[in-house]
Image (cartoon, grey):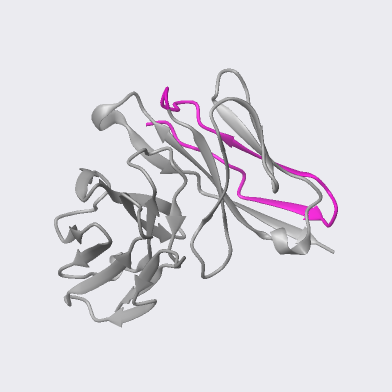
């Protein structure tokens, strides 16, 4: 089975531009997590969904960030407008059940650079 | 919220047993402790998970004391390919807005020949 698939793997764009990161969950998984990883702050949970419904978005930095699940197998994380401090590796992860203790399966991330 | 803390780095040699401890003194009552391994340019990969006492699988053991305020990942007989960053993940807080899934900052394990 295919794992969690993220696209693009790398993105470089200028500040002020809109950035959209994409994530395809493992088939049959019901929970979706978005994380941001930086050297200074490590892995931070931004938001997670259970059955397409956002459960905890307290980690979303500010209103410039938004995440959606238009269907059960796909999610987007959007940054508009982007700023240099948003540069990081963004991971999504999925798990089988809406139980926060379930092991999470991570994609290989999107490395985002905002110039 | 209390932090989840781990040593920044550890060094070892091939064939040795390695123990990495994570402190999480504000762990949520019903939450498990989960450990992940991460290689460069890859996402974290699940290693092992437990709630209390000891859990063992084919790659590691996890020791959790009765108060659950810490946990120790044990890797038996490490090899060069075990060089990676290891993270603990726990839920901290008492619930509601006070709850947060939190990764430790990670421990870089370097296995030397």
Residue found at x 84% / y 49%? B16
Total residue callouts: 0
In the rendered view, does A29 fall on the left or right side of B38? Answer: left
For the C terminus of chain A, which image quadrant?
A: bottom left
Name the residue nearer the viewer: B92 or A26. Answer: A26
Q: Position of residue B80 (x, y in %)?
A: 76, 63
Residue found at x 50% / y 44%? B104
Which residue range is magenta in the image?
A: B1-30
Is residue A84 among the parts visible in the rendering?
Answer: yes
Name the residue nearer the viewer: A86 or B100. Answer: B100
Name the residue nearer the viewer: A115 or B6. Answer: B6
Q: Quadrant of residue A2?
A: bottom left
For residue A97, above or below residue A8: above
Is residue A67 among the parts visible in the rendering?
Answer: no
Q: Quadrant of residue B2?
A: top left
Q: Position of residue B54 (x, y in %)?
A: 66, 29
Name the residue nearer the viewer: B25 or A90. Answer: A90
Main SS of the magenta part reads loop
For residue A52, above or below residue B72: below
Q: Say if the magenta span includes residue B11.
A: yes
In the rendered view, does B110 fall on the left or right side of A60? Answer: right
Seen as rendered, the residue at the extreme top is B66
For residue B27, above or below residue A8: above
For residue B35, above or below residue A113: above
Q: Position of residue B15 (x, y in %)?
A: 85, 53
Q: Say if the magenta span includes residue B10.
A: yes
Residue found at x 58% / y 29%? B70
């Amino acid at each position: 089975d295919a794992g969690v698939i993220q696209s693009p793997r790398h993105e470089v764009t200028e500040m002020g531009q809109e950035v959209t990161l994409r994530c395809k969950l493992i088939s049959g998984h019901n929970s979706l997590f978005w994380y941001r990883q930086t050297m200074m702050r490590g892995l931070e949970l931004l938001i997670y969904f259970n059955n397409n419904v956002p459960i905890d978005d307290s980690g979303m930095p500010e209103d410039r960030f938004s995440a959606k699940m238009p269907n059960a197998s796909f999610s987007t994380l959007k940054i508009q407008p982007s700023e240099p401090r948003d540069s990081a590796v963004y991971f999504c992860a999925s798990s089988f059940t809406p139980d926060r203790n379930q092991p999470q399966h991570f994609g290989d991330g999107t490395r985002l650079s905002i110039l | 919220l209390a932090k989840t803390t781990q040593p920044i780095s550890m060094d070892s040699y091939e064939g040795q047993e390695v123990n990495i401890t994570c402190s999480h003194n504000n762990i949520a009552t019903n939450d498990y402790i989960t450990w992940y391994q991460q290689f460069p340019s890859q996402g974290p990969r699940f290693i092992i998970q437990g709630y209390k006492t000891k859990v063992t699988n084919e790659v590691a053991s996890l020791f959790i004391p009765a108060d659950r305020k810490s946990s120790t990942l044990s890797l038996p007989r490490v090899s060069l390919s075990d060089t990676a960053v290891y993270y603990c993940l726990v839920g901290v807080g008492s619930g509601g807005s006070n709850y947060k899934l939190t990764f430790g900052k990670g421990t870089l394990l370097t296995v030397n020949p």
